[in-house]
Image (spheres, rainbow, N blue to C red):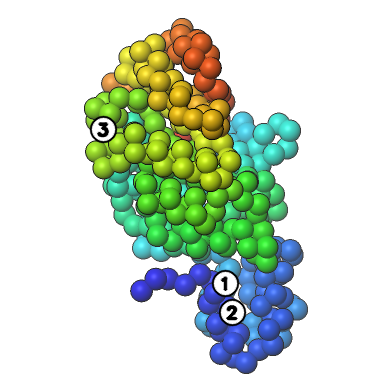
Amino acid sequence: MKPTSKYTRIRQLLSEWKQPSYRYKQINEAIFKHKVGEYERMSMLPRSLREELLRALGSQVCSVRPVAELASSQVCKVLFAVAGDERVETVRLHYERGWKSYCISTQCGCGFGCKFCATGTIGLKRNLTADEITDQLLYFHLNGHRLDSVSFMGMGEALANPHLFEALHILTDPGLFGLGHRRLTISTIGLLPGIERLTREYPQINLTFSLHSPFDDQRSELMPINNRFPIRDVLDALDRHIRQTGRKVYIAYILLRGVNDSMEHAGAVAEWLRGRGDWEHLYHVTLIPYNSTDVTPDSYHASDASRIEDFVRVLKSRGIRFTIRTQFGSDINAACGQLYRTE
C-alpha cells in the first residue's frame, strides 16, 4: 500500500476528529511560518488536539533524524537516519552572494550501478517516502535556513522512485513549502517514462540528463541503463520536453581522465546536440570534474587542465553552450558522485 504523506494524514485525522477545517491551516502555518517542529509546541491548538496528534503521529514533525554532520567551506553534509535503520545524505551549499542550495536524496542507495558513482556501489536498499524526501529540507527549514533552490542529485535516481511526484506536490504546494517550480532541478540518467511524466505534470521544473559518454557502447559500460534507454531515445524525449516547455535542458558530463575526455568525445557530444531543430540552443552542457572516493575504481581520475581546455575548445568551436561546474565539498565527500551514507 502506498504510504500517505504526513500532510494528507493530518487532514484525514482532523476530519475523523470532527475538527474545524482551519485547524489544518494552523498546523501548516506552525510548521512553515513559525518553524515549530513538535506537535506539543503548537500552542495555537487546543491541548486535547495536540495530545491526539502526539498519539497518532509521534512527537516530531520531521521523520528524518540527523546523526552526523560534516562541514567545510560553503558546504554542510548531514547524514540522516530513516526508518529501517537506513542512512541517507543531504548537502547544503552556501554561495557567497547568500544563496542557499540543497542536494537531496530520493533513495537509500541506488540500483543502477553507474561505475564512477559511490552511491551505486551500495545497491538499492529502498525508495524514500515522500515525507523522507521532503523532510530533508524540512530539517533545514526548521533550523532557520532559507530554501532557495533544490536539486534532486543526492543518493538515488529520482525518476525511479514512485513517491517523487508526491514529494514534488508537497514542495510546490503554496500552503506547505511553496517553492517555485523553477527553483527545483531533477537529475536523471535517462528514465524515459519519468521524463515524459515530468514533461506532462511539472513542465517548469529544471531537467538535467546525465550523459557522461556520447558513445552508446562506452556509455552502456559506464552506465548500464543505456542498454534500456540509449542516447538517441533519451535525446528525442528531451527534444519533446523542450518543444513543449520552452525550458533549457542541462546535459551533465563527468570528465574522466583518458576515458571520456578526448577531443573525439567532445566532438561527438557536439554532434548529438547540433542540428536537432530550432530549440537546440536550449541544450546546455555542464562539465563536472570527477571526484574520487574510497569505493569507486582506482582507474578513474579527474581530467588534467589541458584536456579540459581541449574539450572546451571543441565545444566552443561547434557553438555548444557549456559551463564548468564549480566544485564544493570534495574534501568531505559531499561533491557529485561521492555520497555514500557514511556512518
Residue at image position (46%, 57%) is 164
Front-lying residue, 64 or 1: 1
| Badge 3 or badge 1: first in the primary sequence | 1
Residue at image position (40%, 15%) is 267
On the question of residue 118 being in view, the answer is: no
Q: Residue furthest bottom?
A: 18
Q: Which residue is mark 2?
A: 11
**Which type of secondary structure does the marked residue at label 3 adopt?**
helix
Residue type for callout 2: Arg
Left or right: residue 106 compared with residue 214: right
Front-lying residue, 193 or 188: 193
Examine the rendered structure and indicate whether residue 17 appears above or below residue 262: below
Which image quarter holds the N terminus? Answer: bottom left
Find the distance from the CA under tag 3 to the CA under tag 1: 41 Å
Q: Which residue is mark 1?
A: 7
The image quarter containing residue 210 is: top left
Examine the rendered structure and indicate whether residue 70 appears above or below residue 221: below
Mark 1 touching mark 2, by CB under 8 A? yes
| Badge 2 or badge 3: first in the primary sequence | 2
Left or right: residue 178 compared with residue 321: right
Q: Residues within 10 Å of mark 2 (few under 14, many from 20)?
A: some
Residue 60 in picture, x, y percent from top left: 57, 69
Residue at image position (60%, 38%) is 93
Q: Which residue is mark 3?
A: 220
Left or right: residue 103 compared with residue 161: right
